[in-house]
Amino acid sequence: MKTCVRFSTRLWVALGLFALSLCPSARSADLVLEDDSLLVAFDSDSGGLARLENKSTHWTMERRPELAMSFRLHAPLPGRRDNFILGQKQRAAEAAKISPHEARFQWRDLLSEHGGTLPIIFTSTVTLSNGVLTFSGAITNHSPLTIETVDYPYFGDFNPPARNSSLNTRHMSYGDLPSSEIYPGFSNQKGYWGVDFPMQTVASKDSLFCLIQAPQEGLYVEMRDPTQPYMLEYTFEQHPGVVDSINSPVPQTDALSGLPVHLEFRTCHFVFVHPHSAMNLAPVVLRGYKGDWHAGVDLYKEWRATWFKPPHFPEWVRNVNAWQQLQINSPEQEYRVPYTNLISYGRECAANGVSAIQLVGWNRGGQDGGDPAQDTDPGLGAWRELHDAIAQIQAGGVKMILFAKLNWADRTTAWFTNELFKFGATDPFGIHYEQAGYSYRTPTQLAGINNHRRDIMDFASPEYRRIAAREFQKLMRLGSAGWLWDELCSHSPADYSFAANHGYPPPGYIYSGDIPLTAQLRAAADKLNPDFLFSGEGPQDWLMPYYLSYFRISGDSTPVCRYLDPQAPVMVAVTGFDDREMLNLILLDRYIISYEPYNFKGHLTDFPLTLAYGQKIDALRRRYHDYLWDGDFRDTLGANVSANGAYRHAVYVTRAGKRAVVVVNQETTRPIIATVELPHPGKLLIASPEQPEPLPATGSLQIPARSAAVLMEQ
């Protein structure tokens, strides 16, 4: 019976859309904004977005006016949460151009699906200026219901440039720019049990922008508020579905089985507008571009420059440097390295040109145990012993960086039971969100049986931020040169906390506390030592004004963080015992080396092959720092490279305008010959980690297996 009801609803929608297509007056798309780059048209009756065209490329993104959508609201009822307000069932009380490049729409007394007409006003302003299309909105909620989400803008018929084209979404995530196909194939991310139509989403907590990338052009979409006031999801939904469930191809016709085939694209604002209150939406900006992802990210860089403030970093981090990560304890009470034995690791780093040790598991409970406490662990020694070891190591020229986590509270501790539980994030039913913890060392824990499960701490709570700041003060008193905040931008599985006693009207967007807490900690550090280094695992871009970034990469990772900021200190882990492949990528993309033998539980000298090649790479970068360290990273732009095998390349431009091209041979058993074409090249030199002396070169390079070469303009 349930299935029949759903089918009937879909059929009603299909018939309604068909009727609209036969009635021009019902879809009169006569409100048009236009400049040299874009044309956008709206239905003057419904306010629905009926057409969007990139005039310079002739890409019609929104094509069929009969599929025009305006907005969607979700306002749950007592006893029935599934209560939507569909924009296509409303008439616009106002739809007018208020200037040649600006239109205003307003919808009043909105008809909901199951709650009747509600006294809600939704007002939007759309502007188009120099190819920048901006959608702003405001909700005035006079109803007794909470408006949880607002989908706006809303494309009912998003199209690729041509039937034989393709579309992928790309967004920033953990130092990468992953890609997901939405045409001509579309896979469902949400689970067949939860949706009627295949759906994919990208969350603003990962990326402030989303690229919709065709082969030679794209659409850039941006949440224009770097403070993260709430979560926004870039949402894609394929109607009526895919052709088959094995390969998930999108139908190649406008209709299938009498149902319209169309891709919906909308930005979903998780606003939680309380009864009898109002809220402005974060603006959503759209811009077309020509080219690949570089051109799309260039648009983000342009906006980013208006709010991004480069952080202060100590001199040693700005120069070529390398780290070792070392874990000395875990929740299974291994007590690997007593505090007094750390001094030998410091000497080993100094002897091998390693600048810093990231010390993991030094605090009570070990790595992922006891959080967020930043007390020393008696099983490793006394507080004074760690303090003095840090001082002695740093006197020998090696910086100590203390690993910490403030996001979680270990549920096995008395501190959690007696106090911290008050600040755990809770869901709408009052139940605490739980993070499953991590498994270490013993068969029992590796099977997940005795993991230290954790509460997600509510960063939106001012009181919890004060607790976190007190723990940070403990860490600083140990005298280290800095800290590394692991899992810096993770509050999974919670996004919001609905607790009623955390110092704000619930729900609170937990990610909105990331910047205030970081600013609070940075201010405390500056009073003690302005050169105290803030580093973190995978900070999102709006936290990069504070942090050195550390993450792990794969062989096909896209160096989007390096492209965004050629000089930002970014560090990548090296774990293999002859890890030339990873080290070559680190050379290619100007990353700092983090040596991590035995998954950061060993000595540098445990993997001599990796250490020796890493030392050669850093020596090369010091010798040619104008090119490889101080140069402007252009990724693959500015040089054409071809080869008779697998390779990757990157282009650097010095401040004097000289170019360098790094080419990595990704073949594991044979050399390659790579041909590098530079427009109007000067005199060329070649060097490599194993042959650093510069030799005259042409554009043809012979590169041994698992090695790299640098071609430089003299």
Image (cartoon, rainbow, N blue to C red):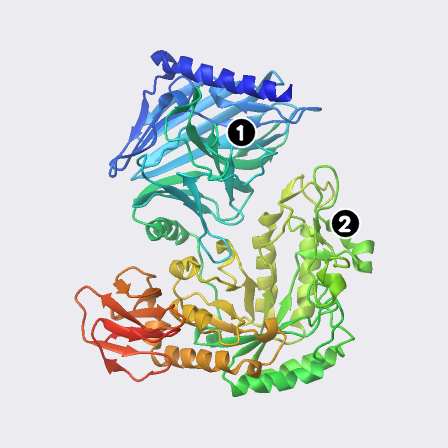
Mark 2 neighbour class, 10 Å CA radius: few under 14, some 14 to 19, many 20 or more: some
Judge whether 412 appears above or below 626 on screen: above
Q: Nearer the viewer, residue 298 or 608?
A: 608
Give the Cα separation between the discs numbered 1 and 2: 32 Å
Judge whether 482 appears above or below 384 on screen: above
Element type at mark 2: helix
**Residue occupying image coordinates x 70% and y 24%:** 78
Query: Where residue 484 sits: x, y (%)?
Result: 59, 67
Q: Is residue 585 visible?
A: yes
Query: Where residue 127 sits: x, y (%)?
Result: 36, 33
Residue 65: mark:
none
* Three-letter code for the amino acid on which mark 1 is drawn: Ile
Q: Nearer the viewer, residue 384 or 520?
A: 384
Marks 1 and 2, the one that precedes in the sequence:
1
Q: Nearer the viewer, mark 1 or mark 2?
A: 2
Judge whether 692 appears above or below 571 on screen: below
Q: Is residue 654 visible?
A: no
Instruction: Give the quarter of the figure containing the N terminus.
Output: top right
Mark 1 neighbour class, 10 Å CA radius: few under 14, some 14 to 19, many 20 or more: many
Element type at mark 1: strand
* Residue 6 occupies quadrant: top right
Residue 422: mark:
2
Query: Where residue 616 sits: x, y (%)?
Result: 41, 81
Query: Where residue 56 sits: x, y (%)?
Result: 24, 38
* Three-letter code for the amino acid on which mark 2 is drawn: Lys
Residue at which label 1 appears: 139
Residue closest to the far left: 680
**Residue occupying image coordinates x 76% and y 79%:** 381
Instruction: Give the quarter of the figure containing the C terminus.
Output: bottom left
